[in-house]
Amino acid sequence: MPREHRILITGASGFVGSWLQRELEKRRLEQGTDLIVLTAGQGDVSDWKTDIADRGQVMTLIRGCRPTAIIHLAAIAAPADARKMPQRAWDVNFHGTMNLAYATMELAPEARFIFVGSSEAYGASFIDAANAPVKEGAALKPMNVYGATKAAADVLVGQLAHDGLKSIRFRPFNHTGPGQTDAYVVSAFAKQLAEISLGVKHPRIAVGNLSAFRDFLDVRDVVRAYADAALVEDVSKSLGGVFNLSSGRSVQIQSILDMLIQLSGLKVDVEIDPQRLRGPEIAVALGDNKAALTAFGWRPEIELSRTLGDVLDDWKIRLAR
């Protein structure tokens, strides 16, 4: 008899959470899986309105939901937001994870705890790697507030696996797709190009550092890994494990901009905006994805050119409204 899946998504109304809900609904329809998706967050559309930083609210959430798997996305996710609100970033990203993990161990001890970390936790290890793909065993040496909060939560979840938490940790690299806010580089470029194409902005695009190389994924590929971890029958070999989600290829930000401009068919001037330049920048961030392939058969499937085209089209639709 197939087991019932009760999957709780924290941060469900965010960019990644919205795509994850679509992926799980697609699987329910395709596979006829006995699947209930429960959503928690601070948005009005969530089933459970929960502040993850409030331990009492989190205990109520887990007690009420009785999940078989938790996919923990809730976070102050934009590095710029974490930099501006460090206290809140630590409260949500670290203490929120602690609240959720301990509540799970106490009230839903058989539930899988799928923690969504970040490649930002590696930080200076990218510099040490000298442009080679970073493996999961690399030291966590975060260089910004967001990376530090995610690294601390990652270490906590890893430690609790030894105390019985049925955890799977993911460290996704940069991912984008339709619906992302313009706080992220691809979406920021695409929004400006969409504004120019609609005639509401001069043909001039403001950018930050274009020289960095990053490992980019499509959000629709990323959420497949989270769904697999929640739904696959036997994860005994993966419990306590940690998995990069990456393409294994680095692309220069300049190339991303060039591809988007080409897709837009526009002639634009590019100018550096000092406001968009961050602190210490890592020249190349690149991830080894073999562990996720071995454990879940996961690999990225969507070409970068398609992702960029979809993000640009999405901004044109959003702005035209």
Image: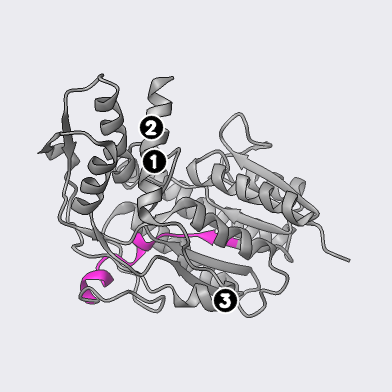
Query: Dot 1 corresponds to which residue?
Result: 311
Residue 120 screen position, x and y as percent: 34, 60
Name the residue at 21% across, 33% down.
266
Q: Which numbered circle lies on residue 260?
A: none
Boundaries of the magenta span: 114-128
Residue 7 screen position, x and y as percent: 69, 53
Answer with the quarter of the image where residue 113 lies.
bottom right
Query: Dot 3 corresponds to which residue?
Result: 295
Name the residue at 56% across, 73% down.
297
Left or right of 34 in this view: 296: left
Q: Do the CB atoms of the residues marked 1 and 2 lie less than 8 Å apart?
A: yes
Label 3 Cα neighbours within 10 Å, binned few <14 / some 14-19 / many ≥20? some
Q: Which amino acid does label 2 sit on?
A: Trp
For residue 50, say whether it is visible: yes
Residue 136 screen position, x and y as percent: 41, 75
Q: Which amino acid does label 1 sit on?
A: Val
Q: Which residue lies furthest to the right in this view?
A: 1
Query: Circle 2 — which element?
Result: helix
Q: Which amino acid does label 3 sit on?
A: Ala
> In front: 167, or 268?
268
Q: Which numbered circle lies on residue 315?
A: 2
For residue 11, say whether it is visible: no
